[in-house]
Amino acid sequence: MALQTIQMQVIILLGPPGAGKGSQALRIREKLGIAHISTGELLRNHIGAESALGRRAKEYIEMGQLVPDSLIFDMLFTRIAEPDCQQGYLLDGFPRNLAQAQELQERLKGHPAVAINLRLDDSTIVERITKRLICKGCQTPHHLIYSPPKTAGKCDKCGQALYQRSDDTREVVEARLKVYREETAPLSVYYRELGAFHEIDGARSQREVFQDIMDYVEDKQNRFSSGSAKIAKVPQGSSVSS
Ligand code: AMP
């Protein structure tokens, strides 16, 4: 089955900060036409809008800590209920701990989503993140050394301004890595046990990583569609239809 004809897909991108989830998410969204939901980006939008949620989330983000689940769940599941998620969605930055994975699994009514883990060593992560610049408009990441913008301070893709995230400093990255190791990394075991888990070396080129993701998603979809199971079921309480 061609990827474009798949009716409902839920893809979860796992991996430490800086492993390339954001870059791959943009490519996957373009290829599959499914919604890309980055909980970090949703939170940053709230901070920018100075909403009550943004004000509460800011202090956690600036310390490299996880924002409490209760704040994340409302924000995320409201987003998933929007019409552009009806054909599926791609989660980038969620789940971040076991409680979040279990909550998602419950909303998926027990059917597994496809989880892809991008692996990367700590020194490469620090090097990538501390020199990372993000586009304010389309969110495309650039890197001062590996993918410098053609015009300083401007996004190659859409021309809008680039900025450095306030939590992309060495100190905060180290805190984020600690949280990742303790709370997020164990999710590999959780998704492996659910039987829909694939790990990729995030140090490979973006193109190779993307191809690997697509091969896995297509293979999984073919196997699900020829059997009785589906990649994911409709979250409870959402308008999403499978
Ligand atoms: P990210 O853009 O995914 O790197 O996330 C930036 C920051 O937002 C994280 O370091 C957390 O403080 C917060 N955050 C993003 N997603 C979540 C989540 N699923 N649960 C808790 N906190 C989150």
Image (cartoon, rainbow, N blue to C red):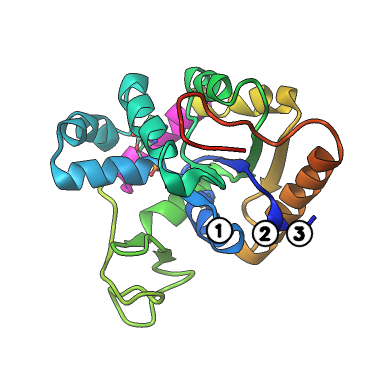
In the image, residue 164 above or below residue 11: below
Task: Give, as a three-letter code, the residue at label 2.
Answer: Gln
Question: Can residue 175 be spotted in the picture?
Answer: no
Q: Quadrant of the N terminus?
A: bottom right
Residue 117, picture quadrant: top right
Residue depicted at x 22% and y 41%: 46
Of 171 and 149, the residue lying toward us: 149
At which x and y percent is residue 119?
62, 43
Left or right: 222 as drawn, with respect to 20: right
| As drawn, 178 above or below 158 | above
Q: Amino acid at mark 3?
A: Ala
- Residue 163 in the image: x percent, y percent? 27, 61
Tell me if residue 77 is in the magenta stretch.
Answer: no
Where is mark 1, residue-wise?
Answer: 33
Q: Specify which label sits upstream in the sequence, 3 or 1.
A: 3
Instruction: Give the residue at x 33% y 19%.
Output: 70
Q: Earlier in the sequence, mark 2 or mark 1?
A: 2
Q: Is residue 226 above or below residue 188?
A: below
Q: Nearer the viewer, residue 41 or 3?
A: 3
Tag 2 residue: 4
Residue at image location 32% in from the left, 43% down from the top: 42
Q: Is residue 176 magenta?
A: yes
Where is residue 183 drawn, in percent x and y? 49, 23
Which residue is identified by label 3? 2
Q: Are marks 2 and 1 in contact (CB under 8 Å)?
A: yes
Q: Quadrant of ligand 1?
A: top left
